[in-house]
Image: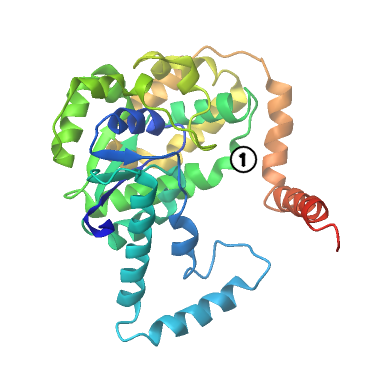
């Protein structure tokens, strides 16, 4: 029965090593997983009045849906019961293994609905994976931007997402587990034993081989680390220093660390002063300065002129012509 399957949610920002941890845990026979499902986002946002752009009037839809939910005998509790049963049924079918005790859902964008997910699945397990925010920024530049400054496209993750994750973690820290990426790659067996204890599963040495033995076929997930590393490696911990090299990038990162603040960094397991010192000691060059300057301006203009919306609308029109030629 789907109700007997317990979900594991791996909460993190993108580029925090979540695919690595997912593959390691996926090597356990009792833990089923797939590439990032993203399945909960539209269902949780269905009753959120903001944060959604659609052809229909989303705000009015929320009003109508809320009225509908209130007609049920149990109101919101009935809606959540049915949503929980629906999602667990999907997890069971995706697991493809009736013996699986857990289904691990690793979707980084769940950071914006992390508290709602914890409320929705009271018997679930929740792992918060933290990574040095400078490394996260660097990895976004390297992976998503091919070395170019593209951080403006990930403000939702770096700001809204981080804020939501820290807030959710503090509120639920007695019932969730925190893991630092740096600790995971430095002492993988120790950290995996700690995770297994939290999940109430036995540790097996084969978990350490999950990076080689577990494959994820979906289009979402880590597009680089899965190809570059065939074993757990601590090499990525220091890679950010080669990316955050010019004055613009270092200045932005200083402001970002200041925005996160000492308290939130400490909650994540990092010392504010140490991160500032590491950033300051990183060699400075003029490489990419001109290009970054243009992209900084583009990023500042984006909230005023929604370039992405224009591009999406153009893409939609092309799709309509391709799939609906009779229009």
Find disc 1 in the rendering and name its residue.
152
- The residue positioned 26% from the left and 20% from the top of the image is 208
- Relative to 120, say whether 6 is above or below: above
* Residue projecting furthest to the right: 326
Q: Where is residue 233 in the image (x, y as percent from the top left)?
A: 36, 14
Q: Which of 160 and 91 is in front in this view?
A: 91
- Tell me the element at label 1: helix
- Image color mode: rainbow
Q: Which of 20 and 134 is in front in this view?
A: 20
- The residue positioned 77% from the left and 51% from the top of the image is 319
Q: Nearer the viewer, residue 322 or 314?
A: 322
In the displayed structure image, the side of residue 79 where residue 161 appears, left or right: right
- The residue positioned 35% from the left and 70% from the top of the image is 82
Q: Where is residue 107 in the image (x, y as percent from the top left)?
A: 43, 44
- Relative to 39, say whether 297 is above or below: above
Label 1 Cα crowd, 10 Å radius (few <14 / some 14-19 / many 20+): some
Locate residue 261: give its quadrant: top left
In the displayed structure image, the side of residue 32 where residue 177 appears, left or right: left
Locate residue 248: give its quadrant: top right
Q: Where is residue 210 in the image (x, y as percent from the top left)?
A: 32, 24
Q: Quadrant of the N terminus?
A: bottom left
Q: In which quarter of the image is the C terminus?
A: bottom right
């Amino acid at each position: 029965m789907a109700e007997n399957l317990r979900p594991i949610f791996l909460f993190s920002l993108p580029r925090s090593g979540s695919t690595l941890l997912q593959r390691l845990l996926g090597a356990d026979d009792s833990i089923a997983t797939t590439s990032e499902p993203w399945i909960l986002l539209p269902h949780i946002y269905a009753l959120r009045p903001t944060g959604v752009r659609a052809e229909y009037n989303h705000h009015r839809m929320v009003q109508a849906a809320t009225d509908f939910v209130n007609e049920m005998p149990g109101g919101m509790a009935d809606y959540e019961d049915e949503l929980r049963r629906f999602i667990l049924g999907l997890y069971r079918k995706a697991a493809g293994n009736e013996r699986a005790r857990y289904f691990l859902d690793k979707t980084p964008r769940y950071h914006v609905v992390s508290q709602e997910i914890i409320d929705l699945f009271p018997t679930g397990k929740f792992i918060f994976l933290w990574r040095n925010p400078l490394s996260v920024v660097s990895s976004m530049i390297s992976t998503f931007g091919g070395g170019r400054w593209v951080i403006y496209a990930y403000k939702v993750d770096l700001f809204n997402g981080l804020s939501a994750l820290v807030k959710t973690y503090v509120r639920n820290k007695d019932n969730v587990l925190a893991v630092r990426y740096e600790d995971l790659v430095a002492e993988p067996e120790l950290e995996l034993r700690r995770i297994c204890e939290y999940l109430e599963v036995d540790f097996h040495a084969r978990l350490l081989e999950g990076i080689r033995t577990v494959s994820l076929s979906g289009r979402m997930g880590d597009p680089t680390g899965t190809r570059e590393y065939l074993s757990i490696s601590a090499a990525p911990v220091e890679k950010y220093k080669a990316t955050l090299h010019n004055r613009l990038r270092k200045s932005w990162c200083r402001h970002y660390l200041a925005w996160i603040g000492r308290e939130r960094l400490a909650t994540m397991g990092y010392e504010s002063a140490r991160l500032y010192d590491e950033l300051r000691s990183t060699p400075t060059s003029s490489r990419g300065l001109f290009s970054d300057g243009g992209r900084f301006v583009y990023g500042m203009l984006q909230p005023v002129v929604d370039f992405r919306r224009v591009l999406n609308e153009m893409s939609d029109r092309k799709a309509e012509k391709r799939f609906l030629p009779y229009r």
